[in-house]
Image: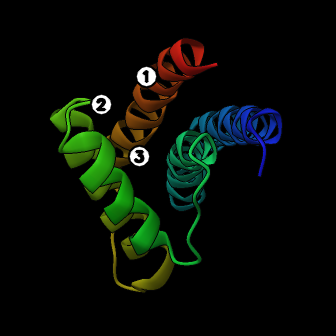
Amino acid sequence: MNTKISKELGSHRLEQAREELNDAKILFKVKSYKSANNRAYYSIFHAIKAVLALEPIDFKRHKDIIAYFNKNYIHSEIFPKSIGRKISEASRIREDSDYDDEFVVREEDTLSQIKTAEELIELVEEYMKRKI
C-alpha cells in the first residue's frame, strides 16, 4: 500500500471513530448504556486502526490489533501508558455489555468509555498531524 492510500485510510478510520463517538454520546443521552458502550468501544477501536493504517498493518481479530497497539505504541510511550489501561478496560466493558446477559451496565462506566474515546481521538489526531 502506498503512503497516500495509507494516509487516506487513516483519515477515513479516524472520521469513522468520530462518528461512532457521536453515536455513543447520543445513546448515552437517552440512557441506552449498553449500546453507548458498544459505540464508544468501536470509536476507540477505529482510532487505533487509524494509527495502524499509517504503517500500514492490520489484523483480523480485535485482540491482535489491541495487542499490537499496546506493544508498539503504548509500551514505547508514543501514546501514554494511562490510555493503554483505559483501552483495556473499554474492551472488557464492551465485551461484558455485548455478551454477558447478567452484566449490569452502570452510567458511570459508560461515561468513562466515552471519555476514553474522546481522549484517544485527540491523541490520535495529534499523532496523525505529526505523521502526515
Q: Is residue 104 left or right of residue 26?
A: left
Residue at point 55%, 71% (across, down): 59
CB atoms at circles 1 and 3 under 8 Å apart?
A: no
Query: What distance separates the C-alpha of mark 1 from that of mark 3?
Result: 20 Å
CB atoms at circles 2 and 3 under 8 Å apart?
A: no
Residue at point 52%, 77% (across, down): 61
Q: Which residue is mark 3?
A: 110
Q: Earlier in the sequence, mark 2 or mark 3?
A: 2
Q: Judging from the image, what secondary structure is the residue with disc 3 in?
A: helix
- Is residue 105 something that shows in the picture? no
Question: Closer to the camera, 38 or 13?
Answer: 13
Q: Which residue is mark 2?
A: 79
- Is residue 8 something that shows in the picture? yes
Q: What's the amino acid at mark 3?
A: Thr
Q: Earlier in the sequence, mark 1 or mark 3?
A: 3
Q: Earlier in the sequence, mark 2 or mark 1?
A: 2
Q: Is residue 85 left or right of residue 93?
A: left
Query: What distance separates the C-alpha of mark 2 from that of mark 3?
Result: 23 Å
Q: Which residue is mark 1?
A: 123
Residue at point 69%, 38% (across, down): 10
